[in-house]
Image: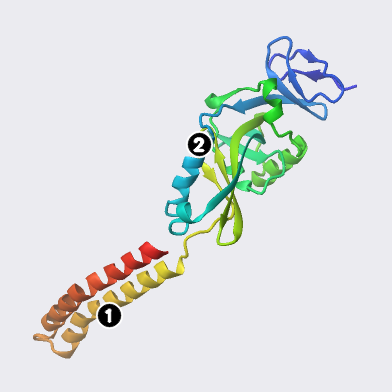
């Protein structure tokens, strides 16, 4: 049989059959056992309750990334809480310490891998949380393969399993069902697919405004070429006058688009 040792103190561990979460009897470190390998097992402590997480979601819905009034026009149909597992790899690049995360279980919100975790925020995993924790279904070796593919030549100086507290929300908008996750330690909102603002109206307003002012800016040049003495001055006056008229019209159009998109 393989000899399992604590990654912190080196003490020999003797897990029971099927046991994957262990507290080291020598140093009290919490470790995770994966195919004869032991790694640190951490948890991120939540600071938000369900109502606070929903408020964070509503603020995100009313922000600049989503469609207008999504917070008012959508309907939250389900809210659930769990500790989601992530593989944690600490490594160095150009002298800078970096942290890479990979989901340790199947999820539709792969943005979880983009969370920013600080080592100082992590605490040893408490086995009493097991009822609310999703067990890892992605082996450590698979997580390492993803890490090596993302960072060729990099060497992970520390590997760990981290359970992150999340609230998962399901909401309806115009007949479609969407999923969003609120990380319960910082209130970060993560979503892969959501009703995003349409970019075409904004690009149209910007394109028309650029074209209008480019044409106006050409008047002094054209006037100067046509009449060397007073053409440039006349063109500048015409450009300024039309610009004063065009600017509020374009601003009003932009405001109208922003209010409805």
Q: Which secondary structure lies at badge 1?
A: helix
Q: x, y (%) of residue 33?
A: 77, 26
Placement of 178 over or under 29, stated as above or below: below
Q: x, y (%) of residue 156?
A: 66, 33
Q: Which residue is rendered at x = 66% and y = 49% of the image?
A: 108
Earlier-in-chain disc, 1 versus 2: 2
State how far apart marks 1 and 2 are (Cα): 53 Å
Task: Left or right? Give the position of 4 relative to 155.
Answer: right
The image quadrant that residue 80 belongs to is top right
Q: Which secondary structure lies at badge 2?
A: helix
Q: Which residue is rendered at x = 9% and y = 86% of the image?
A: 229
Residue 51's disc number: 2
Q: Is residue 160 visible?
A: no
Placement of 145 over or under 13, stated as above or below: below
Label 2 neighbour load within 10 Å: few <14, some 14-19, many 20+: few
Q: Is residue 133 visible?
A: yes
Q: Which residue is rendered at x = 85% and y = 19% of the image?
A: 16
Task: Left or right? Give the position of 194 relative to 7.
Answer: left
Quadrant occupied by the N terminus: top right
Residue 153's disc number: none
Q: Residue furthest left?
A: 229
Label 1 neighbour load within 10 Å: few <14, some 14-19, many 20+: few
Q: Residue furthest top?
A: 26
Task: Left or right? Give the position of 244 relative to 16.
Answer: left
Q: Nearer the viewer, residue 82 or 50?
A: 50
Q: x, y (%) of residue 184?
A: 54, 34
Quadrant occupied by the C terminus: bottom left
The image quadrant that residue 85 belongs to is top right
The image quadrant that residue 42 belongs to is top right
Residue 215's disc number: 1
Placement of 156 over or under 151, stated as above or below: above
Which circle, 1 or 2, is nearer the viewer?
2
């Amino acid at each position: 049989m393989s000899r399992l040792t604590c990654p912190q103190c080196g003490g020999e561990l003797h897990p029971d059959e099927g046991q994957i979460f262990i507290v080291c009897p020598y140093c009290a470190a919490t470790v995770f056992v994966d195919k004869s390998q032991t790694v640190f097992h951490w948890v991120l402590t939540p600071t938000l309750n369900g109502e606070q997480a929903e408020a964070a979601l509503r603020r995100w819905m009313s922000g600049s990334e989503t469609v207008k009034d999504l917070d008012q026009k959508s309907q939250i149909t389900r809210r659930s809480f769990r500790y989601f597992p992530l593989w944690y790899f600490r490594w160095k690049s150009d002298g800078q310490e970096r942290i890479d995360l990979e989901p340790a279980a199947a999820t539709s919100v792969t943005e979880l891998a983009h969370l920013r975790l600080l080592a100082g925020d992590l605490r040893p995993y408490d086995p009493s949380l097991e009822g609310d924790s999703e067990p890892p279904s992605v082996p450590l070796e698979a997580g390492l393969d993803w890490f090596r593919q993302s960072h060729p030549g990099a060497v992970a100086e520390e590997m760990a399993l981290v359970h992150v507290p999340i609230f998962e929300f399901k909401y309806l908008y115009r007949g479609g069902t969407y999923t969003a996750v609120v990380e319960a330690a910082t209130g970060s909102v993560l979503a892969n697919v959501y009703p995003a603002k349409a970019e075409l109206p904004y690009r149209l307003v910007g394109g028309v405004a650029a074209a209008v002012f480019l044409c106006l800016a050409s008047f002094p040049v054209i006037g100067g070429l046509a009449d060397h003495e007073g053409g440039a001055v006349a063109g500048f006056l015409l450009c300024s006058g039309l610009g004063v008229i065009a600017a509020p019209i374009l601003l009003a159009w932009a405001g109208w688009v922003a209010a409805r998109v």
